[in-house]
Image (spheres, helix red, strand yellow):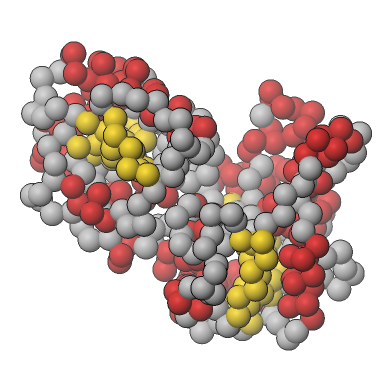
Amino acid sequence: MTIVALSLWFPFPPDNGSRARAFYLSRELARRGHQIRLITGIQPDTNFNEGTPAELAEICRSVTAIPHQWVDTKNVGLFSAFSSVPRAVKQSVNPALTAALTLSLRLPMDVLLVFERGADSYLPETDDFPPALLDQVEFSGDFDKTHRLTGMKSVRYWRQQLQRYQAVTAVSEAETAAARQALGMPESGAPTVHTAPNGADVAAFEKRPATGTIPGWLVFTGSQTYAPNREAVLHFAREIYPRLITRYSLSANPHLLVTGRLNGDESTFSCVSYSGFLPDMRPVWSSAEIAIVPLLRGGGTRIKILEAWASGVPVVSTSVGAAGLDAIHGEHLLIADTPDDFARAIALLLNEPARAAALAENARRFVEMRYDWSVIGGKMDDLLQGIAAGGS
């Protein structure tokens, strides 16, 4: 089967959620014998001077990369309030990307795979639309009561726009339910909605050894260019850490390592260090005692948790941090939503290594069975083949 894939994010290296999903799902589809023609954007931080990376060339029959094009948001914002088209769609204009995709769709192909709802805006308007699947839609934010008018306009637009797809996917049951609420039933012309979670490349992560960890070493992985990740670090340093060191007798002094791209104005705390972006997280996971996710807001499924699980590292997270994962508190991770509870959970795992090891072992089995990219890629393969055959 020949698949034309559209990704706004250049998929390699797979160093954020959007890139990772596009790369690993494409890889799994290629491993199942399908031909991938990739049309992709290039971000300013992408080094494409030496051509297509070998890792991407190995899984794609062809790669057409188009530089991202910025749109003047001042004029867009002025007129978007009077338009039925959401502002984000008006900002999504790149004639070169649309032209490249149009050309690829004229060649023999079986199905179109579009990564993320925002990429739909770059598709050509045509009456001869191919069999297509839109991956990773998010509608939960459109039902946020604080942005009700904007959200309802978005829902009305996408309900009509997405009728050209046979199916869409969402990364969690909650997002699947939101998508079904927004789009309506298939009998009314809406696409079918399926859950296809984010995953981890489990085989790439070795289980953390029982010895060799750095005592008290906590890890939070998340780009500091993303505001919710910056807020999570502040929440740990200002609210959780003081409770942790004053209320508990600990086997080791805790210290947090934050990995991910830097924003340039990171807050300084004695209990926090920043590594910047690391191309390979495996040495960090092998040394970590606990992975923490003190997020207070943000959407999606937490690839950072899945990779910690794959590495055999126990996890403490807020409910927001673990959103989208069908994990059980006390079996796969510890959920803590107040600073008091978060500090207590960290202290428990630092002081009870056997408890921490059991939690990590359960989580490792869980991610192998449920969230390995090979499992998710198999479900995506079935969906695409059904669409290409005329179903959904």
**Above/below status of 62 relative to 272:** below
Q: Looking at the image, which residue sits at the far front?
A: 49
Q: Looking at the image, which residue sits at the far top?
A: 246
What percent of the width, then of the height, locates residue 302?
44, 45
Which quadrant of the structure image shows residue 294?
Answer: top left
Q: Is residue 219 left or right of residue 132?
A: left
Q: Is residue 73 left or right of residue 234?
A: right
Which quadrant of the structure image shows residue 97?
Answer: bottom right
Q: Quadrant of the N terminus?
A: bottom right
Q: Is residue 254 visible?
A: yes
What percent of the width, then of the height, locates residue 381?
55, 72
**Above/below status of 54 relative to 156:** below
- Give 379 or 41, whichever is nearer the viewer: 41
Total tally of numbered discs in the picture: 0
The residue sitting at 8% across, 49% down in the picture is 211
Q: Quadrant of the C terminus?
A: bottom right
The residue sitting at 49% across, 52% down in the picture is 17
**Above/below status of 63 relative to 186:** below
The residue sitting at 31% across, 24% down in the picture is 269
What percent of the width, then of the height, locates residue 23?
50, 66
Q: Is residue 337 visible?
A: no
The residue sitting at 19% across, 18% down in the picture is 245
**Above/below status of 261 relative to 61:** above
